[in-house]
Amino acid sequence: MKKYFQFEELGTNFRREILGGLTTFLAMAYILVVNPVTLTLSSVEDLPDALRMDYGSVFVATALAAAIGSILMGVIARYPIALAPGMGLNAFFAYTVVLTFGIPWETALTGVLISGVIFVLLSLSGIREKIINAIPAELKYAVGAGIGLFITFVGFQNSGIIVKNDNVIVGIGDLTSGNTLLAIFGILVTVMLLTKGIKSGVFAGMVITAIVGMIFGLIDVPTKIIGSMPSLSPTFGTAFNAFGNPGELFTGQMLIVILTFLFVAFFDTAGTLVAVAQQAGLMKNNVLPRVGKGLLADSLSIVFGAVLGTSTTTSYVESTSGVAAGARSGFAAVVTGLLFILSIFFFPLLSVVTSAVTAPALIIVGVMMAASLKNIEWDKFEIAVPAFFTVIMMPLTYSIATGIACGFIFYPITMIMKGKAKQVHPIMYGLFIIFILYFVFLI
């Protein structure tokens, strides 16, 4: 097993991989609660039960989709990258497709399934791999740094340090709030541990924060360890139902739905793969080894997730927290996947993994990811402009895909005006057109 996962070559061991896998799981565990809440539209009142997905079934589907996707990524691609139903895509599924478009959730799952099948075909053909390898190194560094700023912003929001402000969009939150103070404590502890050179500082910081939270009554102490497993039958296989009525599928709205799932998942995944790989030191000469296998694993997870009964499954940028804790190989992703399976039975224990516990990890990992900014040639304006727009637009638009789109539109423009049109890969010109169409028709 050590040989298969290249422990010696990557300078890792079972302890580091298990710790990294556990850290990634803890950083992602919130999806087990957030995804069912989102897909069942629990915040929407007076909604007929027929339009709501079953909470228990979605919870199990979320856990199993994350487990299958993470294990596939670990075994096939051997990357320390875990997968789960994606944030943003689940909101699009629930609030836009189901609530706004009025498309039944069963048919929406069919849209996810179709997008997953298309992804598999693109991955097998090698098209996705060629696109990622055609992206210039400077923009890859920008994507990694941009995602770092994005998850830092998410961490500050989740902790209550940064809140909505009607006058200036965002502002400082109530720093006297118990959970916000707990998150600040977690940030300080994590910073001190990492500054001292403790490699497991991110994970240790989360554990210490959770314990302190329970001591001060900010986090409920679990009353039991094992809970019963909900039934998966309400959602399992419903993605195939719409094929019996083609009229529901061949509509303009469904085309928009499928294209949106395709577009956002494609570039969110590409950005995450590059960001995590850079942090783990897996990039070689601007090329990500085995990227085709990683994309295939990601594509297959979408298909499995749709069949189980959840929105698009994608690679999680929270995997960077596992890398920060020492993960370097696919074994860490396998560990994360197994923990997702166990979470089905030990769900009560997840009550200690609150936003105050995970926020410090996201914030500190963002600091680490921002280090890739040093590799960008800022003195070359034709490089600085697209790189900067890629970085800044991710947190400002709250979308990794939109940040990538902005940078990739400006890259060919600045290179052409600089007289370097021939240095731009033909695929980048194709992406330039696609991203413009993205803003015209999908935003």
Image: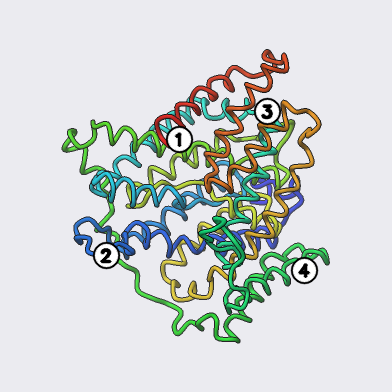
Report the mark closest to the observer, 1 or 2.
2
* Residue 140 image offset from top left, x and y in percent: 66, 35
Distance Cα–Cα, label 4 vs label 2: 45 Å
Q: Is residue 22 visible?
A: no
Calculate the distance from the C-alpha at mark 4 to the C-alpha at mark 3.
35 Å
Q: In terms of depth relative to the viewer, which is nearer, 108 or 296? A: 108
Q: Which residue is mark 3?
A: 136
The amino acid type of the residue labelled 2 equals Glu
Earlier in the chain: of badge 4 and badge 2, it is 2
Query: In front: 375, or 330?
Result: 375
- Taking 202 as reference, is 247 above or below it? above
Residue 187, x across and y down, in percent: 69, 68
Q: CA distance from mark 1 to mark 4?
A: 39 Å
Report helix, strand or loop for mark 1. helix
- Does residue 73 appear to the left or right of 43 in the view shown? right
Q: Which residue is mark 4?
A: 193
State the mark number for residue 222.
Answer: none
Q: Considering only order in the chain, which callout, 2 or 3, is on the residue closer to the N terminus?
A: 2
Q: Position of residue 269 (x, y in %)?
A: 53, 41
The amino acid pointed to by label 4 is: Leu
